[in-house]
Amino acid sequence: MADKKAIKKLSKPGKAADRPKQKHIASSKQGVKKMKVSLLKSFKEKRMAIQSINPYTEEVMQEFTLMTEPEINEQVEKSRQAFKGWRTLSVSERAISIKNLG
C-alpha cells in the first residue's frame, strides 16, 4: 500500500510554477476546425470548385462549382417534388425509367 502512494507521488507533476513552460500544440481536431473555418470564409468571398482528377493521368476530368445555400435548398426542394411522383410508381415502372436513362 505504501508503495502505491510512493509511486503516485513520483508520477504527479510538480506545481505549474516548477514546470518549464511548453508551447501549446494544437490537436488535429483544432487544426481541422480552423481549416473548416478558413475554408468557409474563403468560400463566401469567392465561388470555390472541386476538381475530379484521374489518379493515373492526373488529368482534370471535370470541375464542380460549389453551390450556395439557396441553390442547395432549391435542389432539395426539386428532389422532394420528384420523389412524390417516383414513389407512386411500381418497381417495374421504375426499372423501365432507369433503363431509359442509358
Image (cartoon, rainbow, N blue to C red):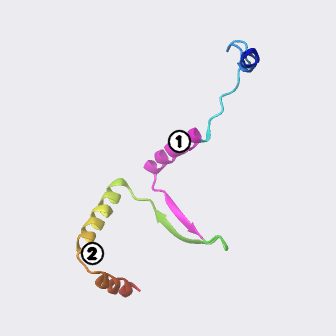
Q: CA distance from mark 1 to mark 2?
A: 39 Å
Residue flagged by tag 1: what amino acid is it? Answer: Lys
Could you say where residue 68 lies in the image, as x and y percent from the top left? Answer: 38, 55
Bounds of the magenta segment: 29-53
Q: Which circle, 1 or 2, is nearer the viewer?
A: 2
What crowding class fits label 2: few (fewer than 14 Cα within 10 Å), some (14-19), or many (20 or more)?
Answer: some
Could you say where residue 9 lies in the image, as x and y percent from the top left? Answer: 73, 15
Horizontal relation, residue 42 to residue 7: left or right: left
Quadrant holding the N terminus: top right
Q: Nearer the viewer, residue 52 or 91?
A: 91
Quadrant holding the C terminus: bottom left
Q: Is residue 67 magenta?
A: no
Q: Which mark is residue 86?
A: 2
Residue flagged by tag 2: what amino acid is it? Answer: Trp
Q: Which residue is mark 1?
A: 33
Q: Is residue 56 above or below residue 25?
A: below
Check disc 1 and report its element: helix, strand or loop: helix
Q: Is residue 37 magenta?
A: yes
Q: Residue at position x 35%, y 84% from top?
A: 95
Q: Nearer the viewer, residue 15 or 7?
A: 7
Horizontal relation, residue 2 to residue 81: left or right: right
Q: Residue at position x 31%, y 57% from top?
A: 73
Q: Indicate which disc, 1 or 2, sits on the residue closer to the N terminus.
A: 1
Given the current orientation, which residue lies at the most extreme front position?
1
Q: Which mark is residue 87?
A: none
Could you say where residue 67 lies in the image, as x and y percent from the top left? Answer: 40, 59
Q: Residue at position x 33%, y 87% from top?
A: 96
Q: Nearer the viewer, residue 54 or 2?
A: 2
Dividing the picture into quarters, in which one does residue 76 lie?
Answer: bottom left
